[in-house]
Amino acid sequence: MSLLLPPPPLLLLLAALVASATAATTYRPDWNRLQGLARARVEYCPQERSATRLNTTSSHNLVMKHLPGADPELVLLGRRYEELERIPLSEMTREEINALVQELGFYRKAAPDAQVPPEYLWAPARSPEGTSDRADL
């Protein structure tokens, strides 16, 4: 009995497609690019179906911006509002988005008017392990 296998180039293409699909939903912060991260905004179209997954409005220094026709993206900004990175959110689940925002160090408030701890007032991002915390303030 012999197994029929697709030709090797087809296998490689299939492997690449699977890898790109999983890479789209698993963002890993590059802390070298994110030095000075201080705030973020989520750009999205409220009419889009994927907008219902966005539940980050109670995070400190993170705002929601409605843009007609926009695919949802998390835009990471520095202290002077310079854009550091854009992260597509359309393929992520609500849990993945919330975990990403938490991993980036944004403080999630219990209520919109709740107090924010002092360590989260100016820069929500954590420094990578093994480096001095908040050395660039």
Image (cartoon, rainbow, N blue to C red):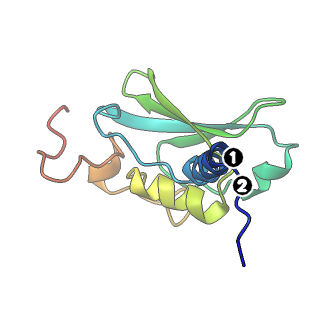
x, y percent for residue 101? 49, 53
Question: What is the quadrant of the C terminus in the image?
Answer: top left
Q: Residue 33 versus residue 120: which sits nearer the camera?
A: 33
Task: Please say if 117 is above or below 88.
Answer: below
Task: Please say if 47 is above or below 136.
Answer: below
Task: Please say if 54 is above or below 42.
Answer: below
Q: Residue 89 versus residue 55: which sits nearer the camera?
A: 89
Q: Residue 111 versus residue 91: which sits nearer the camera?
A: 91
Extreme residue toward the right, this view: 47
Tell me, yes or no, if residue 112 can be seen here: no
At horizontal 44% and vertical 20% (from top left) the residue drawn is: 82
At horizontal 53% and vertical 56% (from top left) the residue drawn is: 113
- The CA distance from mark 2 to mark 1 is 6 Å
Amino acid on which disc 1 is placed: Leu
x, y percent for residue 90? 71, 46
Q: Are marks 2 and 1 in contact (CB under 8 Å)?
A: yes
Q: Which mark is residue 10?
A: 1
Q: Which mark is residue 6?
A: 2
How packed mark 2 is, by other alpha carbons closer than 10 Å (few <14, some 14-19, many 20 or more), is few
Question: What is the quadrant of the N terminus in the image?
Answer: bottom right
Corner quadrant of residue 117: bottom left
In screen coordinates, is 111 left or right of 129?
right
At horizontal 23% and vertical 48% (from top left) the residue drawn is: 128
Tell me, yes or no, if residue 40 can be seen here: yes
At horizontal 27% and vertical 51% (from top left) the residue drawn is: 119
x, y percent for residue 133? 16, 46
Q: Residue 83 versus residue 118: which sits nearer the camera?
A: 83
Disc tally is 2
Q: Which mark is residue 117?
A: none
Mark 1 residue element: helix
Mark 2 residue element: loop
x, y percent for residue 118? 28, 52
